[in-house]
Amino acid sequence: MGQERLIDEVKVQVDGEGEEAILMLHGWPDTPEVWEAQVVYFKENYRCVRVTLPSYDGQGPREKYTIEQIVELIKDVIHQYGIEDKAILMVHDWGAAFGYQFYIRHPEMVSKIVGVDIGDFQTYMDKAPLKTKLMTLAYQLVNVLFWYLGRNGGDKLTRILAKSFKAPGTNETIFSNMNWPYYMFWFAGEHAYKNSFKAFNPSCPFLFIYGEDKPIMFHDQKWAEELGAKENNSTMSFNSDHWLMVREPEHFNNTVSQWLDLLARKGVRT
């Protein structure tokens, strides 16, 4: 275990040294431990920085956060632990949504992006079949309900839902606190993410990896293919579920490493 520090009461773990930093952002209902295999692999050559999403440790008060607050948090982390105020983003689930929105607002602080299983949500929702839209809406609204229930029932129900999705966490690491992004997406009024999220089409090098073995795809395939066809980009699929970096860590790490090595050989370092 490397250094462990707090920024605005958010835990930040730092492992390894190198000429580039990788900022790893997890999603629901996870902790930074989902990146453990990546830290072990990449810390020899990179500075691996993991952030616990606010209110995801289940210990503090039940809070919810605007996209502006999350963007500022990521900005502060990169200022303190990035290399020359830059980082590679390695992002999954809500971490991907937040990382993409951060890039849109601060592209100068991001050198490359590894997006895991989550694409541009607006494109996804605009083009998804009705069945997919209804399935997405259903589980997200259920998570909003569990957030309202809180520790009095909400924790148990969140754990049941997480296990039905085969999430890798244990009951001791899953809390109803974790559901606040779903509330913020739909019901936060002028701060609702559905109103404030901007379309994500990066100009920096972008590697998109997604799993095929799941009931819902969280990206538009045409969006993924068009981005993957651009110079220095790549799109790849695994025969895995939503947590492919946990299910197939060796394949995932080799894929990311080969992409980064290819960029280095080409002299791409934005």
Image (cartoon, rainbow, N blue to C red):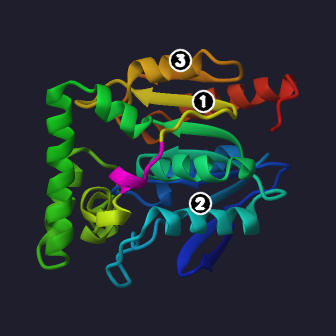
Q: Which residue is mark 3?
A: 226
Q: Nearer the viewer, residue 225 or 48?
A: 225
Q: Secondary structure at mark 2?
A: strand
**Residue pictured at 29% horizontal, 66% vertical:** 188
**Residue 166 part of the magenta-drawn span:** no
What is the crowding at mark 1: few (fewer than 14 residues within 10 Å), some, or many (at least 20)?
A: many
Percent position of residue 145, x then y = 14, 64
Q: Earlier in the sequence, mark 1 or mark 2?
A: 2
Question: Which mark is in front, 1 or 3?
Answer: 3
Q: Kindly give the residue lying farthest to the bottom in the view shown.
A: 61
Q: 91 above or below 123?
A: below
User: Which secondary structure type mostly characterizes the magenta part of the structure?
Assistant: helix
Q: Which residue is mark 1?
A: 207
Q: Earlier in the sequence, mark 3 or mark 2?
A: 2
**Residue pictured at 31% horizontal, 79% vertical:** 62
**Residue pictured at 22% horizontal, 30% vertical:** 215
Checking the image for residue 50, the label placed there is 2
- Callout count: 3
The type of residue carrying mark 3 is: Glu
Q: Secondary structure at mark 1?
A: strand
Q: Earlier in the sequence, mark 1 or mark 3?
A: 1
Q: Which residues are magenta?
A: 193-198
Discs 3, 2 touching: Cβ within 8 Å:
no
The type of residue carrying mark 2 is: Arg
Image quadrant holding the N terminus, namely bottom right
Position of 127 with respect to 41 (left or right) is left
Q: Kindly give the residue lying farthest to the front in the view shown.
A: 190
Q: 180 above or below 224?
A: below
Q: Nearer the viewer, residue 50 or 70?
A: 70
The type of residue carrying mark 1 is: Leu
Is residue 174 something one can see in this rendering? no
Percent position of residue 190, x then y = 34, 64
